[in-house]
Amino acid sequence: MRISRITVWQKSLPLAEPYRLSGGRLGFESLDSTFVRIDTDEGLAGWGEGCPWGHSYLPAFGAGARFAIALLAPVLQGRDPRDIDRLNRLMDLTLPGHGYAKSPIDIALWDIAGQRASQPLHQLLGGAEGDAVPASSSISTGTPEEMVALIEAARAEGCRTHSAKIGGSDPPADIARIEAIEAERLPGEQVTYDVNRAWTPALAVEVMNTVAVHGWFEQPCETLEQCIRVRRLTIQPIMLDECLLSFQDHLDAWREGACEGVKVKPNRLGGLSRARQVRDFGLAVGWRMHVEDTGGTVVADTAALHLALSTPEEHRLGSWLCQPHLADDPAPGEGARSDGGDIRLPGAPGLGVAPDEEWLGEPWTVFD
Ligand code: MG
């Protein structure tokens, strides 16, 4: 089997509501997403999507993904799509780093592998652990009242795990947000306070040592080193996200005892292959993990959720879906969807979802 064509589309994904995080430092109204279809000479086609949320969230951006793919696609042409690890090494040799650009290609290769094996991807990634993955909400930064109201709305949709976006340079404001949310938290609910890098270590220590929180704090500071310092001076469990880009970063985090859990996101790490390595490392060292993607439509959500479903429940926290935040849907009713807070995966072979090509429109470019 050979790769015969690689087609790339760019789509702007307007958010249904503007979204703010990192204490309001970062705001988003639309996401820039890249879709990849890999065709083979035997008639199978695999799909992937890469959407690094926005260009201010990670060292990644949509146009960067597409121009990186323009370098990578000619190297992949004519190769056997079944050689997923080998093709990943070839991509690394061609262009070190830039995992966010490789992610949609890697996901499309996994889609082809699943179709060829007549198995849904979660089967290839380890097998389903339970019937569904609990849905996690994502709560935009706002006043305490606004954030409590957003959590109530997410609760009505069945979410019992919430990611509340806080952070900033005003400790009393963050303490007020946290205390208001904790006061309304129901038994069994879990809230992760996601700072998105906004705090200095001193500010993190001040806020975290003031509030009584049963949940997690996520990515309190910009760098791994700063987060390690916070870890040593506080007691709440810490989840890391944006500062972990490579496998080595995860090794460093573990060796330094920086965290008790991590976010596992294919687009940040370089696709399902790299995300699976991190997930399996996390199992070995006892981390708890939210497995989800950085952003995108149901296509990106579904790829990440196959990995989430194949993650043992004692290590798995809820997964966030980006799709409810978007104004558009390229595959209504298909792929990973939340049903009352339970995210269920398609049983069809491979990824189990493909975007409507009319919705995608003209390709950005075709490599054949
Ligand atoms: Mg986060």
Image (spheres, grey):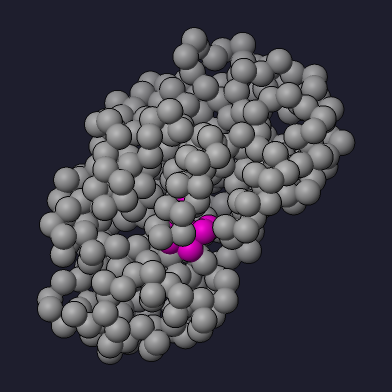
Quadrant showing the N terminus: bottom left
Q: Is residue 92 visible?
A: yes
Question: Which residue range is magenta in the image?
Answer: 265-271
Front-lying residue, 13 or 103: 103
The stretch drawn in magenta includes residue 244: no
Residue visible at 60% across and 23% down? Answer: 215
Horizontal arrangement in the rendering, residue 121 relative to residue 101 (left or right):
left
Name above or below for residue 175 compared with residue 256.
above
Counting from the top left corner in percent of width and height, residue 162 is at 51, 28
Point out the residue furthest to the right here: 202
* Count of residue discs: 0
Q: Quadrant of residue 58?
A: bottom right
Quadrant showing the C terminus: bottom left
Residue visible at 29% across and 26% down? Answer: 340
Name above or below for residue 327 compared with residue 149.
below
Q: Is residue 142 visible?
A: no
Counting from the top left corner in percent of width and height, residue 353 is at 22, 55
Horizontal arrangement in the rendering, residue 81 relative to residue 180 (left or right):
left
Name above or below for residue 140 compared with residue 11.
above
Residue visible at 73% across and 24% down? Answer: 235
Name above or below for residue 117 compared with residue 222.
below
Q: Quadrant of residue 48?
A: bottom left
Residue visible at 43% across and 28% down? Answer: 314
Counting from the top left corner in percent of width and height, residue 35 is at 35, 67
Counting from the top left corner in percent of width and height, residue 248 is at 62, 58
Front-lying residue, 307 or 282: 282
